């Protein structure tokens, strides 16, 4: 097995441009890539015994995100590195063509540490492990714009390198005690899909790495792109009571009804359009009554409530950036600032639109 090919040559990352509703895809301007941001170098560290799903799942999420963006403007540049040029994976397949551990890492970049087989992960006296741990101590991810991301028991390597000092972190439920032993001054948080503390992100077992990757895609590329990636990967995003809430662009998408996804894609792409349930139903090639039933059965909401949630999210983003209530209402597709205020209070949002201005 060879390491996956890297995306095209690095180029400037730009905001996804608005397109006509009937052409390809069109994202709301406020939900695109951060303006002027560079592609992020993502280094997946793959020592011997690495769990394939721990790195292949998140890597595919980032690759899919790149395909949702304008050509030749990837958000993520994927690198697969290890102490050796080839690494025996958890299932016995050899991953070849790995790059050496880089001498230095410059921001913007992420270092991703993944879980390993139980035999490999509990030995920090192994030569290959020591090379990774020493390298982590030199490059010090988790600060200065170089993000540290751990998946499953990859947290144990970070702990052995001293990268979790005074950090809130998590890992696979079977490794919580071992993590606490290796990082005695860290706050080990159980029962979480993922935990963030500054530039350090840690996730629970195996597929939780995909949840975390989609959350990071949403932060970098916008929740609309993350929703498209989740749909393509057929992923049901999980959240516990203490995990960050899903964006309205990602919520209510945990289903496999293609007709409903088509309508939700259109609402997410053009929330300012004068949508009615009848127009939504026409797009979904169904009747208003059937569409309302589909929303209830598969999304747990109504068509207009789903649209209102998206518009409120856009309005909050505009307000937090300093827009006036009137400008935020217009940007999100509300007819007036009064309609925005009413929707705000009906949704039970804290405070008021005015109080949210400039808080981003």
Image (cartoon, rainbow, N blue to C red):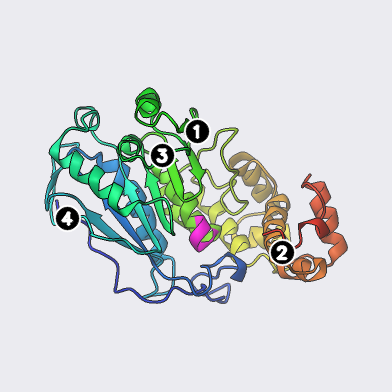
- Dot 4 or dot 3: first in sequence order is 4
Q: Secondary structure at mark 4?
A: loop
Magenta-colored stretch includes residue 160:
no
Q: Kindly identify which residue carries mark 2.
A: 275
The residue lying furthest to the right in this view is 338
Residue 280 in the image: state x and y as whole percent: 66, 60
Q: Nearer the viewer, residue 59 or 197?
A: 197
- Dot 1 or dot 3: first in sequence order is 3
| Real-space Cα separation, disc 2 to disc 3, in angstroms | 48 Å
Residue 39 in the image: state x and y as whole percent: 39, 68
Residue range in magenta is 218-222
Q: Label 3 near label 4: C-beta < 8 Å?
A: no
| Real-space Cα separation, disc 1 to disc 4, in angstroms | 32 Å
| Real-space Cα separation, disc 1 to disc 3, in angstroms | 17 Å
- Dot 2 or dot 3: first in sequence order is 3
- Can you say whether 159 is above or below 119 in the image? below
Dot label at residue 164: 3
Q: Residues within 10 Å of mark 2 (few under 14, many from 20)?
A: some
Q: Which numbered disc, 2 or 1, marks the residue closer to the eye? A: 1
Instruction: State left or right for residue 74 relative to residue 341.
Output: left
Magenta-colored stretch includes residue 219:
yes
- Can you say whether 28 is above or below 124 in the image? below
Q: Quadrant of residue 224?
A: bottom right
Dot label at residue 192: 1
Residue 112 in the image: state x and y as whole percent: 33, 49
Q: Secondary structure at mark 1?
A: loop
Taking the spot 84% from the left edge, 65% from the top edge, the residue there is 337
Residue 161 in the image: state x and y as whole percent: 31, 40
Q: Kindly identify which residue carries mark 4.
A: 98
């Amino acid at each position: 097995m060879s390491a996956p090919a890297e995306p095209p040559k690095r180029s400037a990352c730009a905001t996804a441009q608005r397109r006509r509703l009937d052409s390809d895809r069109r994202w709301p301007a406020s939900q695109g890539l951060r303006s002027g941001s560079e592609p992020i170098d993502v280094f997946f560290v793959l020592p011997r015994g690495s769990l394939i799903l721990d790195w292949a799942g998140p890597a595919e999420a980032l690759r899919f995100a790149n395909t949702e963006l304008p050509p030749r403007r990837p958000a993520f540049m994927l690198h697969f590195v290890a102490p050796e040029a080839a690494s025996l994976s958890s299932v016995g397949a050899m991953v070849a063509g790995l790059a050496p551990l880089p001498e230095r890492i410059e921001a913007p970049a992420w270092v991703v540490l993944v879980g390993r087989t139980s035999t490999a992960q509990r030995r920090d006296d192994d030569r290959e492990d020591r090379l990774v741990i020493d390298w982590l101590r030199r490059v010090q991810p988790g600060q200065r714009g170089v993000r540290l991301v751990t998946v499953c028991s990859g947290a144990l390597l970070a702990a052995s390198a001293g990268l979790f000092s005074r950090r809130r972190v998590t890992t696979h439920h079977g490794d919580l005690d071992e993590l606490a032993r290796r990082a005695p001054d860290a706050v080990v948080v159980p029962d979480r899909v993922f935990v963030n503390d500054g530039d350090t992100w840690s996730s629970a077992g195996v597929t939780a790495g995909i949840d975390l990757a989609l959350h990071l895609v949403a932060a970098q590329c916008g929740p609309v792109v993350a929703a498209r990636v989740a749909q393509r990967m057929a992923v049901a995003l999980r959240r516990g009571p203490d995990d960050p809430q899903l964006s309205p662009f990602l919520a209510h998408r945990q289903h496999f009804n293609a007709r409903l996804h088509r309508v939700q894609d259109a609402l997410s792409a053009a929330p300012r359009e004068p949508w009615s349930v009848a127009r939504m139903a026409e797009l979904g090639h169904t009747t208003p009554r059937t569409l309302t039933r589909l929303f209830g059965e598969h999304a747990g909401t109504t068509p207009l409530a789903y649209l209102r949630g998206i518009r409120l999210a856009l309005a909050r983003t505009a307000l937090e950036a300093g827009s006036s209530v009137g400008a935020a209402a217009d940007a999100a597709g509300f007819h007036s600032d009064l309609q925005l205020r009413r929707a705000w209070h009906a949704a039970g949002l804290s405070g008021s639109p005015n109080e949210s201005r400039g808080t981003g």
